[in-house]
Image (cartoon, helix red, strand yellow):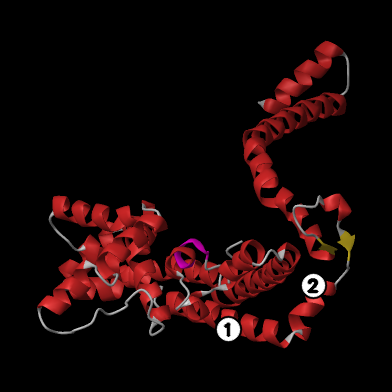
Amino acid sequence: MAKARVYELAKELGVGNKEILEQLKKKKMTKKKWKSIRLFLYVAPFIALVIIFSYYPLYGWIYAFYDYRPPKPFSEAQFVGLKWFKSLVENDIKIKQIVQVLKNTFAMSALTLGTSWLPMLFAVFLNEIRCVKFRKLVQTVTTLPNFVSWVLVYSVAFSLFNSTGMANTLLMKLGFTTEPILFLQSTKHVWFTQWLWLTWKNLGWAAIMYIAAISGIDDELFQAAKVDGANRMQLIHHITIPSLIPTYFVLLMINIANFLNNGMEQYYVFQNAFNKQYIQVLDLYVYNTAMGSGSYSVSVAISMLKSVVSVILLVGANTFSKKVRGESFI
């Protein structure tokens, strides 16, 4: 029918069939072009935001190559090349500091990575709660801490665990101790206690991804397994958890890529003169170097090296994902 219509048009216009077909193709190409432009305009604001807030700040890397000392303007700063990068490996004190900071960073990231299955397990058991109201209550209560500022979290921790806080008062009244225990100032188990605070704050929020994945599992699988006599634990073991593995693997690869990105808010509020040596992760060390010591150029140099290593980890995790799963996550 379409070809017959082309022939009729060709006779009416007195032109060849090829010319008519070429004109129709041009019209289709024009429509596709305008559709592509329209789709690009939809995403253009988001691209602009990414460029402004993610890529434009990279201009600040230039500070790593100058001897910038506020309050003098940057225009008066002297160009020093790779001086600050060399100082990171030539100064023994600086090397010891960075080694300790990397220990802290790797330890806390390893704890988080090693227990990354907890949100999945929590989501599985949360899904098994039959009372809908109670399930929603538990999910809400465990998700809300994610939206609480670390400053408020520390305020709660301080009121509970400082020398005159509720925990010490109770322990002393019960006769378990005669002197207050310095929980927040202790240098013992710093990595573990910080992991506990982080897990308490993020567990419910991290489980949301797995709850969404569980809701996407075909219900016919569960019904067929029940017909075969499977109990609840067998359903979890043979259907739910295997269905969540792809989601878990993708999130695990992203966590590996972000291995050095611990953030600093949590550690900034919990740090003090006693535990600083063990709580100072890479992001916090960069901040303290800039704001505490006034070494802005050195801090930029450290953050640049961190960014390079993070990109290498991201590429490595993506390559590993391709080999193991047959597909990448970026």
| Marks 2 and 1, the one that precedes in the sequence | 2
Q: In which quarter of the image is the N terminus?
A: top right
In magenta, the rendered stretch is: 263-267
Residue 86, position as x, y percentages in the image: 81, 79
Q: Main secondary structure of the magenta part?
A: helix
Q: Report helix, strand or loop for mark 2.
A: helix
Residue 133, position as x, y percentages in the image: 15, 50
Question: Which residue is rendered at x = 30% and y = 71% of the image?
Answer: 121
267 or 294: which is nearer to us? 294
Question: Which residue is rendered at x = 45% and y = 78% of the image?
Answer: 274
Q: Report helix, strand or loop for mark 1.
A: helix
Question: Which residue is rendered at x = 84% and y = 64% of the image?
Answer: 65
Residue 207 placement, left or right of 106: left
Say which residue label 2 marks: 84
Say which residue label 1 marks: 100
43 or 204: which is nearer to us? 204
Numbered badge on residue 21 = none
Up the image or down, 316 lies above or below 47; here it is below
Q: Residue furthest top?
A: 12
Q: Is residue 228 visible?
A: no
Q: In which quarter of the image is the C terminus?
A: bottom right
Are the residues flagged by discs 2 and 1 in contact, CB closer than 8 Å?
no
What is the three-letter code of the residue carrying label 1? Gln
